[in-house]
Each structure stands twice: as structure tokens, then as C-alpha cells.
Image (cartoon, rainbow, N blue to C red):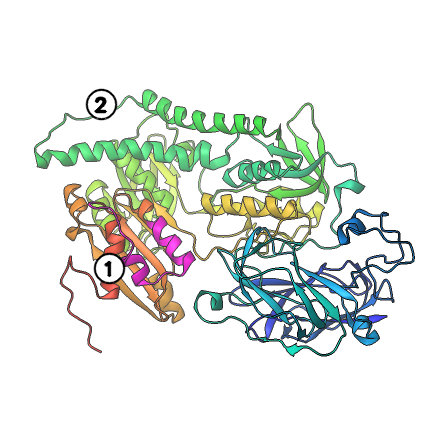
Amino acid sequence: MAQEIKVPDIGDFDEVEIIELLVAEGDTVEKEQPLITLESDKATLEVPSTAAGRITSLKVAEGDKVSEGDVIATVEAEDESGDDDGDEEPAGDTAEADKQSDEPRGADEPSEEADDSDGDEADDSGSGETVEVKVPDIGDFDSVEVIEVLVAEGDTVEKEQPLITLESDKATLEVPSTVAGTIRELKVKEGSTVSEGDLIALVASASGGGKPAKSESKSGGDSAKASSGSAPKSEPKATTPASDPKNDKHNYDCDVLVLGSGPGGYTAAFRAADMGLNVTLVERHSVLGGVCLNVGCIPSKALLHSAKVIEDAANMASHGVTFGKPEIDLAKLLDYKQSVIDQLTGGLKSMAAKRKVNVVNGTGTFADEHTLKIDGNDEVSQLTFNKAIIAVGSEPVMLPGWPEDERIWTSEEALSPDEIPGSLLVVGGGIIGCEIANVYAAHGTEVDVVEMTDSLIPGADKDLIKPLTKRMNKRCGNIWVSTKVTGLKANKKALKATFEGKDAPESKNYDRVLVAVGRKPNGHKIGAENAGLEVNERGFIPVDKQCRTNVAHIFAIGDVSGEPQLAHRATHQGKVAAECCAGEKAAFDAKCIPSVVYTDPEVAWTGVTETQAKKEGIEYTKSAFPWAANGRAIGLDATDGSTKLLFGADGRIIGAGAVGSGAGDLIAETCLAIEMGADAHDIGLTIHPHPTLAETVGMAAEAEAGTLTDLYIPKKKK
């Protein structure tokens, strides 16, 4: 018979948007198989079918908004008797039957468990069959505490009426009855811990009498922060379309193929392997680690460390400690940089071997949606896969019309120079440009920086950039903002650059020119069209919260999947993609992604910036603490630093920034505060060690809360 599948109790939420349909008309579904995905401002929730059968009609579409009781679909049940549990089978025929009763039963004896997929026919029959109501799928949570029992023995309950309230460390969840009837026996009490499949109560279906059950849900406090019956926000349901091929039906070379071994790629491969999947990692270079470990983040930080030691030694002269002029052995310095790289990439090789990840070297391009062609490998020409994770990263943008000359560098060449040049022009004052400019300026090169916008590091607030700009103006020859390079000519002795800008000269000669104007994703270099993958004009591959592309079994992470193009974003996406490949409930749902400029001073920010808040009309208050009032900063001669926090209209932190020594380490605390929804008191009342720079975070929060004693701040007029 046809059954209507309706939206169950979803707490206080009303008009919740459907963000994905997981089935289509004509599909055959199992009981508890997800039909749709809902998304509120607090959580993502999948609504399962309450019956097994065939979808005869879908009543909703993506983008629709639904509330409790709305009809999702009609299902033609597989067994019109309403008994899904095979009552006519002998008791010993299945393992499931053994679980239902300790007493054997005959072939004609009905099971004690009625159909708990719907319960409607049991209601109509008045048979009073006993139904076991169990804890449903609650994600990865195990041994969750029962904080409230909402019914008592003898109560009459409706189908979908909450019976108990569970509370994990992430959310509060009500478990509803799967059938209407009378509570015969409760199997749990407050303080009990339960997991999926545990018995909650025995319900005599369709029997009258009994006292009315209380149906009010727990509200207020922490429990109000999550919807009743909702999955925790950090554990949204994995959405694997019904059409997703299964490896048990195909003879693929691997369960998961990961293309690219940067921070996102190797993380995805290792996480998938840890979850028991057969993983192949394809990397075009001979070593793992991608751009970040080999020619990007890691080598640049090794050289920035050298630059900071030189700067710190020079700065100590004014405090009574004088060193001689540094003598730079470039070959030895580059050996040190390479030793750092080798230690990390060697560790990756070892971990891949221990996890039994199959590493294939070669350039991979898609031949079709389940096949990757391999070029540059004499032993392997192609690989087939059940699922794939694309982690091919990005490459530097080169300016059109410029000559091809080995003296024109990208960041890769700048981190492995054949000599320390006498002069260097850095084109682009973003993160990469500023970091490399500082490296070369500290090692004796005359450096000029040119930036088209009106400030260095365009993505950061100007008050954070001001101390860095001041320091770089002392180190570098020139910093020209609101200026562009109009031409570059490769002469025999020098590279001649011409400029257009208020303060820039008409032209100037340089030994080397670094192009640091951004990076472009490699989406157009992998034969994406052969696999039916969508790639936009810029080379990005659009993905959803599960990092899934438009092809259901192919995922994309890291630089190729969108901005910001940061290694730590790729790492977290890699775990999400791997977990989804393994059928886990996972989604990339970060509230904030920090950015750090590893110069001296460092600049770091996360969440909403002031520039963004003003542009988008976001209501906020700012609280800042100057490092000139911090004992640790004074001892470090870092008094030009500062820490600021932004709080939203509800008093919770929405953004943060810092400039000064170790700012990148400080910002991590504020990221956690944003993720946890902390307010000024939460941060200010957290005891920070003294004397540390970390205290500036707590003191900035105290300034917002009005409890700061380390500065005198006049009270705000009400």
C-alpha cells in the first residue's frame, strides 16, 4: 500500500530549506534510507524513509522549504501487510530474528516486533502488537547520555512524538516514537547512556487508554542551541547518490584514487587508508608533498627563519649586544632548507608505506569517469577507481607579454636561487610577495615592491598591515602601492621595468624580477571533460560541503576547489572527502579559515574582517589591545604589535586579527573561539599564562567586557 513519508519533529525549526534530494521517483529505498537533506542556520539534517519500498511520487524539490508534518514523498511499501520483519519466517532463519526474542517461535507464530517502519496498519487493526522502539542512527556518536525521559509507562503517544532527549558534546537530540500506541515498558532512565540500536521502550500499538504523555521538549540553555531531532552541525550526513557505483560490482584497481600529494592529497589518502579503503596516490613528481612541502610553504619558512635571525641580531645592537656583519654561505643555507624538506617528505613516504598506500609517479589525466591515464610511468599506463579525490593544486600566474628569461622568477625559483642578487623587483605585494621580499632584503638584496592596490596584503585590514609596512619601508628600497608594471624588457645586463604610478620612477633596472601576482588552479590540466567534470573559466572545480563535484563519486579539495588557497583548508577538506568516500557523515563546515603572513612582524587574521563588515553592513564592535602594554612584548622589543577582536550584535566573537611576533600562533585561539561561539567573557575569563603574548587575546576580550585593568579605558556612554 502507498504510504506518505512526512517531515518528522525537527524541534523549533520551521520553513527549513531542502538543499538536496537524495532519491528520484521510481527509486527503490530501504527503511531509514535518507530521502532529502535539510539545512537550517544551525544544522544539516537528513530525513529518512519510514518504510521500504518504491518512490511513486516526490512532493518536494530542491530549494523548497518544509516544516514538521509536510509530505515528502509517497512510497509503495514492499510488504502491504506492514510487517517488514518477516513474521512468517521461522525464528532461527535469520540473525535478526535471533535478536528479537530469546524464545524460539514456529513458522506460523507472529513476531513480537511489529512493523516499526510506519506503524499505520498496526494502528488501524487495533491488534495491540508490541513494538520495540530503538535508538536510530545518530551518526558517529556512541554511549550518548539520556538527559530527560519525556514519557512514562502507561502514557499514550503519537507517532513521531519525542520519547527521550539525548545530549552529546555537540548537540541535543530528541528520539521520537516510530509508532502510535501505549508505553508498556521503559528500558532507559535519565543518566543512562545509549547507542544506535539500543532499546528505548516497548509500545503497544493502536491500544487506547493510558494517561496523556508530556510532549514538551527540553528548551533553554545549551539544549536550545541544537534542533531537536537534528544531527549535530559538525556531523552532517554524507550524501551518496543511489547511482553511486559500488566497488563490489566492479573490478576497479582501487577503492579511492587521490590525484596530487600536497597537504590535501596526502591527508586524504592517509585518512582513507586508515578507514580501511584500498588507496592509490598519483603524484607527478618523484617525491610527495606537492608545492607546499617542496617549493612553497615549508622552504619559504626555512629561509624566513634565517632572515629573522639576521634581523634579530641586528636589532640587539641598540640593546647592548653587537654581532658582526653576517657572512652568508648560500650553498650551505640552501642545504639547510633542503634538509627541512627532505625530513618532511621522507616522513610522508614512510607513512604511505606503513598505511599500504600505493604511490604511483606520473602525470594523471582522466580518460573517463572511472579511469585515470598515467603519463611518465613505464610500468603503469592507466588506473581504474571506484571514487577519486582531485588535489592537483595551483600554479603561479605569469603576466602576459613578458619575455621568457631565467632572471624572471616565480616563487619556486626565488626559493632556490643560484646567487643572492644585488637587486630584486617584487611584482605583487600579497602574502608571497611580502614574504620573499623580506627574505632577500634581510640577506642583503636591494628590494623594491610594487602593488596595484592601495595597500600591501590587500585581504587584510589596514590597521594590521600598518606596522608591517612601516618595518618593510626601512628594510626595502621602495614600496610603491597603487602602481603597476607596464612593461619589462630583458637586456643583456639587467631587466628593465617600466612603471605607472604616483611615486614610481618611469623605469628602473633589476638583476631579478619576482612575479607574485597570484596562483591559478590546475582544473583545466587534468582532462576533466573526459570524466564529465564541471570546471569554471578560472580553472576551479565547484564542490559542495562534502567536497563532492558534479560527478557523484569524484571529489575535489584544496586550491583547485576554490578560495582561500591555503594548505590548512586543503588538509581539512582532504579528511572530509576521504570520510565521505568511506560512507561516513562528514562535511567541510568551517566558520573561519585563518590567514597568516610569515614576515617580521607576522600578520594574522580570521573570520570577519573590519573591511568586510563595513562593506557588507555587518553590525560589530571592536576591541583592541596594544602590545606596548604587554610585558612579554616589551621584553621582545615588539611594542608595535597589537591584537584586536570583533564581536557581533549578539556579543559573540566573529573575527580577530593580530600583528607582531608569533601572530600566526595567537590566531589559533581566536579560531577556536569563533567555532565555539564564545563571547568576550568566555575569552576574558580564560586564564592565559603570564607573561606571554597570548595574554593580549584575553586582554582584548576583557576590554570588550569592561573588566580590563591593564589599561585605563573610559567607560562607554550609554
Q: Earlier in the sequence, mark 1 or mark 2?
A: 2
Q: Residues within 10 Å of mark 1 (few under 14, many from 20)?
A: many
- Which quadrant does the N terminus fall into? bottom right
Q: In this image, 489 relative to 373: left or right?
A: left
- Say which residue appears at 11% left-offset and 29% top-offset: 322
Check if mark 1's residue and mark 2's residue have beta carbons within 8 Å: no
For residue 445, above or below residue 478:
above
Can residue 136 be seen in this snapshot? Answer: no
Q: In this image, 476 relative to 180: left or right?
A: left
Q: In this image, 482 relative to 5: left or right?
A: left
Q: Secondary structure at mark 1?
A: strand
Residue at the spot of label 1: 624
- Which quadrant does the C terminus fall into? bottom left
Give the amino acid at mark 1: Ala
Q: Is residue 410 magenta?
A: no
- Say which residue appears at 37% left-offset and 39% top-offset: 514
- Say which residue appears at 75% left-offset and 55% top-offset: 242
Can residue 255 be seen in this snapshot? Answer: yes
Q: Is residue 681 magenta?
A: yes
Residue at the spot of label 2: 327
| Coordinates of residue 609 in the picture (x, y in percent) | 35, 60
Query: Distance between the Cα atoms at labels 1 and 2?
Result: 41 Å
Q: Say which of 484 and 152 sits in front.
A: 152
For residue 589, above or below residue 555:
below
| Coordinates of residue 173 in the picture (x, y in percent) | 56, 63
* Magenta stretch bounds: 667-691
| Coordinates of residue 390 in the picture (x, y in percent) | 60, 43
Q: Residues within 10 Å of mark 2 (few under 14, many from 20)?
A: few
